[in-house]
Image (cartoon, rainbow, N blue to C red):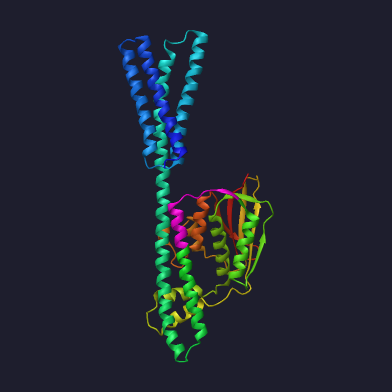
């Protein structure tokens, strides 16, 4: 069903054209102009009909209501600016000499040409915006494909290793509880990949509707979930009551990913990347020590990790900075560079998960800025700067 906003935008453009055609018809019928006037009226009518066609096109073309409104806005700008300029010109001429013959007729032709020119500018503007949106969607799908392929390949190798550990446990050469925990962890990782993939797909296909979000309540809920998932981690919240932003449901996902990422990076041992690289390049031998090391890497808990979720108004009051700080080893510079756009996506580090990408794309959806800095505790602070709610 066509939205009211799209119909309103289309009607604005079409009515502009209809008004132009009406002025041309009335002038020809009442003034009986010479051939030059008839030609000018014919030209004005064609321009008016072009505006009517553009308005009809906005109803049926594959453009969003927001883009249709943008085209209508350019149309109104063309009418108002040139119309005001002509009105001042005719007023001046009337004051110092005499107003030209048929000022409404001639002025309407000029305004119509301006309106068409501005509609064309609006259409080109929408095409540029749409091209940018398509490029972002392609980037999301490209990153999703790269990361998921890597993570699934790694998990497949780990599960192969776990299968051999199950055999060893059955023979009494391995701890059955440890093997079960490792398999459970792999299953949780698979579930996480599925949920993140679904979220990315939603960000690609849908529109992120905004509303007033109470940060204090949201931060409390997200922190509670993080404490339940990582009981050995210390998660604190520093958000004043009444602080709110213009965002939506995806903001919860972004903050959850930031807390999870902070715990993971804070609890990851220095040689974790080397272990993951070993899995990437190791053989499929069931006795591969690299696979055993990588399997055990996922079994540890986040011990002694401290993470703080805080928020405060930025100077000026129209933005709110929501930050997650940790006391760990920090996010690798290469991973930050790719997510922030400093490094091309084609150089995507194979160890980069979807978590930070989800945060980046949620930030884009809500008009937020994403930045990284060093925390006071020596770890990393990731900040989302969002529009403040009215």
Which quadrant of the view contains residue 158?
A: bottom left
Q: Residue furthest front?
A: 1
Asked whether residue 46 is drawn in magenta, I would say: no
Which quadrant of the view contains residue 304?
A: bottom right
The structure residue drawn at horizontal position 59% and vertical position 56%, both measured from the top left corner, is 383
- Closer to the camera in the image, 343 or 298: 298
- Closer to the camera in the image, 272 or 65: 65
Q: Quadrant of the N terminus?
A: top left
Q: Quadrant of the C terminus?
A: top right
Q: Position of residue 93 (x, y in %)?
A: 49, 11
The answer to whether residue 127 is left or right of residue 389 is left
Q: Position of residue 23 (x, y in %)?
A: 40, 18
Above or below: residue 210 compared with residue 275: above
Q: Residue furthest right?
A: 241
Q: Position of residue 125 (x, y in %)?
A: 42, 39
Above or below: residue 339 compared with residue 166: above
The structure residue drawn at horizontal position 43% and vertical position 67%, both measured from the top left corner, is 350
How many numbered discs? 0
Above or below: residue 40 compared with residue 261: above
Asked whether residue 207 is drawn in magenta, I would say: yes
Above or below: residue 139 compared with residue 154: above
- Closer to the camera in the image, 189 or 4: 4
Q: Position of residue 127 (x, y in %)?
A: 39, 41
The magenta stretch is 196-212
Q: Residue furthest bottom?
A: 172
């Amino acid at each position: 069903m066509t939205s009211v906003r799209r119909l309103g935008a289309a009607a604005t453009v079409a009515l502009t054209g209809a008004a132009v055609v009406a002025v041309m018809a009335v002038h020809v019928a009442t003034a009986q102009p010479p051939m030059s006037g008839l030609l000018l009226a014919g030209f004005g009518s064609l321009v008016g009909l072009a505006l009517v066609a553009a308005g009809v096109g906005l109803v049926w073309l594959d453009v969003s209501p927001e883009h249709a409104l943008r085209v209508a806005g350019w149309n109104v700008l063309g009418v108002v600016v040139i119309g005001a300029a002509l009105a001042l010109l005719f007023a001046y001429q009337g004051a110092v000499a005499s107003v030209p013959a048929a000022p409404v007729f001639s002025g309407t032709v000029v305004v119509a040409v301006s309106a068409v020119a501005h509609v064309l500018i609006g259409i080109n503007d929408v095409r540029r915006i749409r091209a940018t949106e398509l490029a972002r969607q392609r980037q999301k799908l490209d990153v999703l494909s790269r990361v998921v392929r890597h993570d699934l390949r790694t998990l497949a190798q780990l599960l192969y290793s776990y299968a051999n550990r199950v055999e060893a446990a059955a023979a009494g050469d391995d701890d059955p509880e440890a093997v079960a925990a490792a398999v459970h962890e792999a299953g949780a990782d698979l579930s996480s990949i599925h949920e993140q993939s679904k979220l990315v797909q939603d960000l690609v296909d849908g529109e992120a509707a905004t509303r007033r979000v109470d940060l204090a309540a949201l931060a409390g809920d997200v922190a509670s979930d993080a404490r339940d998932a990582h009981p050995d981690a210390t998660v604190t919240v520093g958000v004043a009551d009444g602080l709110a932003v213009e965002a939506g449901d995806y903001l919860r996902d972004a903050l959850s990913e930031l807390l999870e990422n902070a715990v993971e990076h804070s609890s990851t041992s220095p040689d974790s990347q080397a272990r993951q690289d070993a899995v990437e390049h190791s053989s499929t031998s069931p006795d591969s020590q690299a696979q055993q090391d990588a399997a055990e890497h996922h079994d540890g808990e986040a011990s002694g990790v401290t993470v703080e979720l805080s928020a405060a108004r930025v100077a000026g009051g129209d933005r709110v900075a929501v930050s997650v700080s940790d006391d760990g080893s920090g996010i690798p510079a290469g991973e930050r560079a790719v997510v922030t756009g400093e490094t091309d996506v084609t150089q995507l580090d194979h160890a980069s998960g979807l978590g930070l990408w989800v945060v980046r794309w949620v930030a884009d959806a809500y008009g937020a800025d994403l930045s990284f800095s060093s925390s006071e505790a020596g770890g990393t602070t990731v900040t989302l700067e969002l529009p403040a709610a009215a």
